Amino acid sequence: MKYFAALLLSAVLFVACSGESSSSAPDPIGEISSSSNEALGSSSSATEKKSSSSVSGKNSSSSVVESSSSGRNSSSSSAILFKQCEEGDTVISETAFKVFYYRCQDNEWVLDSTVNVVKPKVYPNMDSVFNPAVTYGSFRDPRDGKVYKTVQYYMEVQSGNTTVIDSFTVMTQNLNYADTIIDSTTTVFDDSKVEKRCYNDDPWYCDNYFGGLYTWSEALGLPKVCDSVGVADNSKCNVKLGDDAKVQGVCPEGWHVMNEAEWKHFAFPRDIDVSYALLSRAVWENDRNTNSSGLSVLPYGDGTYDSQNSMFWMAHEFKEKPKMGGAFMINGFSTSSASSKYGSLYVRCVMDEGDTFIQ
């Protein structure tokens, strides 16, 4: 096996020697883990970098090899040339996520250490979250002092020969309240505390308009058991649900989780372009977004925030599927949807005072 490893490496070195270029070796960030007797695992094409830097106490004058392969052994039939190394020689091999340091021992190449490369985080530009043409109000949550932009929505409703103007005030930012932050690996929960997740387990997103992600029970202020049963099946899940239910849940006192009737009236008149009026111009890649409503909806994703949809919890569940909670989904059109109660979605809050909304 060592002979084969040396054979593979010599091919890389042979390619490196055939066309030298001058550049400095990378300064990878990460923890070094030691290993041994691990061969270079690719015979694909390589690009060399000449290095004279000192890494982990080892001076290297060998070639730094960047492999474009996927990490699997190549089945190429090209000839593999053998070149025996000399004691004290070192070589560096790079992939997108790791750097491998080899040294010559007993005239054979052995793996000395591995560094996990940590790439700098890149965050989206949030300058255009809100619509500057909209007149926003503001609300300060007394629980933690966070300030949210709000917008008051008006709608004319014809009742017989009478025109009624309904209105309600809604936060134009996702709620970002919690007693504690949990991550995606959490399996034990505390019903005595409000718990939220942040997208990608990164608090930056919580604090930059994406807000907190909550399970269905957390959003509605219920014990965690209510994520696994219907509200009618457990006395602890004492809450009135419905299309026009006004459940405070995780919202501040005097506010309630935006319900289905409010979402639908906000989205109508319904047509193929209606959602573009709700979507923020930040983050989304679609240039058609106008955010004319001022609601400034940001995308939701599982592992990537450019999934081109957004989902919000509502005080609703499905009788035939009690483990599914009601959600409002926006992805080019607006519609009611169902999502596992264990999932983590956004919450928007509507003010109780001055809410003259009629379904």
Image (cartoon, rainbow, N blue to C red):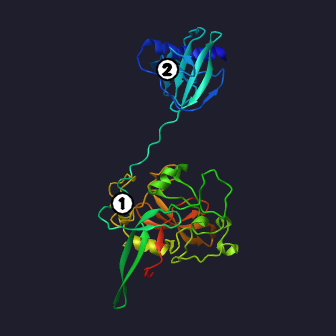
Q: Is residue 115 above or below residue 156?
A: above
Residue at 56% in and 61% down: 178
Q: Residue furthest left?
A: 133
Q: Quadrant of the N terminus?
A: top right
Figure check: 86 above or below 122: above
Image quadrant in which the C terminus is located:
bottom left
**Location of mark 2 (residue):** 64
Q: Residues within 10 Å of mark 2 (few under 14, many from 20)?
A: many
State the residue at coordinates (47%, 51%): 305
Q: Position of residue 256 (x, y in %)?
A: 51, 73
Residue hosting label 1: 130
- Give the numbered dot on residue 353: none
Q: Amino acid at mark 1?
A: Phe
Q: Quadrant of residue 18?
A: top left
Q: Nearer the viewer, residue 189 or 332?
A: 189
Quadrant of the rendered image containing residue 319 = bottom right
